[in-house]
Image (cartoon, helix red, strand yellow):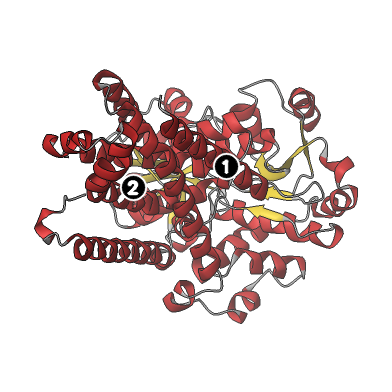
Amino acid sequence: MCLPHRRILRAALLLFAITWLGAAASAQPGEGTLRVGSKRFTESYILAELLAQTAAPHTASPPVVRQGLGNTAIVYEALRSGAIDLYAEYTGTIALEILKGSPADTREAMNAALAPLGLGVAIPLGFNDGYALAVRAADAERLGLRTLSDLAKHPELKLGLSNEFLGRADGWKGLAARYGFTQTPTGLDHGLAYEAVAAKQIDAIDIYTTDAKIDHLGLRVLEDDKKYFPRYDAVVLYRLDLPARLPKAWAALQALEGRLDEHAMIAMNARAELQSVPFDAIARDFLAGTGKGAKAEAREPRRGFAAKLFGPDLWQLARQHLVLVAVSVGVAILIGVPLAILVFPHVRLRALVLGFASLLQTVPSLALLAVLISMLGAIGALPALIALTLYSLLPIMRNTVTGLAEVPNGLRLAGTALGMTPPQNLRLVLLPLALPTLLAGVRTATAIAIGTATIAAFIGAGGFGERIVTGLALNDRELLLAGALPAAALALLSEGIFELIELAMRRRRGTPPSSLPLA
């Protein structure tokens, strides 16, 4: 390897390491900070705010709330890795999904099983939020559906079940075996399932028994007559080092024990889903003793689309999204371009490297993020940046190789005939001629990163995806648009910037527009 190539690669790897280490440092709050996580559904968002606001007066710095981290597997991995300190969980989920069916009928038994993992269960919040299946009340009356056994007698009915429920140990597979269901259910997001059953696209959905939309949409909850589902009592799942690390905050959290019943939880869920009241406001009202009943709902009118689009979080989310895109694409350029240059003369090695980069593009983003969380023991910006960088490598590397290959052979030989060394020929002839094609690859990578960065919100990395994730949880189309439109605007802005760059290059080179390669 020639000296300039080694210098380029060394500089790229150094910046690569510095960037990710800096992201990791910024993603991890200090030891005196309480870190609260939540899953991606309404109730979990609210409970996370309740925990954080209860502890806030007793911590040196404001608690960090990692909202909407995804399903049980991701939030649990974040807890085990130390990326969060606690989150609201349910006893049935702990017993069957986390402990994989280990005998743990009591809190003491659960704590004994969780202790080797450095985790514990405490602070029963006072309500049970169980799984159940529900159908439209009119269909229940017409078909005589009262129990799950009744539903099993009607294989013609379409089931739409949440993706997590389909894969859980206490979910669809065991339920179908217990009751003899023969349907093949459709996988849906939990929030979207309510809209689908109301529109009669499906006939039955899985629900949480404290969901606010059950009565609002006129659904009938079917009795679990064969007692398949366990109790899902809400508790706090926490790291065992937390009480010693933040004793005052931990003592304050004990005041939540037994404070919430099913009616209070349903009322808070209703304020979020039916009134579009922010989660932090709901938690604040409850802790102040004003969160129950119609007065609290009437006090805060439903937010309109403009308020959601231009909310106070807009610039913070824009900054987070821009940082994710700029850093990941920048690091991909610094790694992808030198690597493409190095493998370009070697046909087999080039095919191998580009093939590996192509393979990375086929990995689903959520699966890649889950793997990175497990490997790195961190959530937030670090795994998101790594994933976005990996996705950006292929278009940059492929276009760099293509641009170099398109340089006419006569121009390559001309540089050699003028006495240029290979590094000089690369720097003065090949790269300038390949630059338009390389730039098209960067343009494509930027577009990919802007879109994929919305998924980063699933692991607490911020960006416009936070609104999209919350909108999915609430089935709030306006909030979904409030996240999607700024991301689309950012994509259009990036396209405009690249158009200006290409226009400047054409003027400088005197090249007609039709001669530039397309992305």
Q: Where in the figure is residue 19, as x and y percent of width and height?
A: 57, 45
Q: Which mark is residue 503?
A: none
What residue lies at 25% left-to-right and 41% top-to-bottom? 430
Residue 137 drawn above or below residue 368: below
Mark drawn on residue 20? 1
Identify the residue shown where x is 16% and y is 50%: 517
Front residue of this view, candidates 512 and 170:
512
Residue at the image point whose x is 69% and y is 49% from the top: 36
> Tag 1: Cα neighbours inside 10 Å, few (<14), some, or many (≥20)?
some
- Answer with the quarter of the image where residue 312 lies: bottom right
| Vertical position of residue 237 compared to residue 218: above or below | above
Q: How many marks?
A: 2
Q: Position of residue 129 (x, y in %)?
A: 61, 46
What residue type is disc 2 on?
Ala
User: Does residue 85 appear to the left or right of 193 in the view shown?
Assistant: right
Q: Are marks 1 and 2 in contact (CB under 8 Å)?
A: no
Quadrant hosting residue 390: top left
Distance between mark 1 and mark 2 Cα atoms: 19 Å
Q: Is residue 184 visible?
A: no
In percent of width and height, residue 318 lies at: 49, 64
Residue 404: % across, % down = 23, 37
Q: Is residue 184 above or below residue 267?
A: above
Q: Amino acid at mark 1?
A: Trp
Q: Secondary structure at mark 1?
A: helix
Q: Residues within 10 Å of mark 2 (few under 14, many from 20)?
A: many
Whether residue 245 can be seen here: yes
The residue depicted at 40 percent of the width and 66 percent of the height is 486
Say left or right for 469 vs 209. Answer: left
SS at mark 2 in the image: helix
Residue beneath label 2, please? 445
Screen quadrant of the N terminus = top left
Disc on the earlier residue, 1 or 2? 1
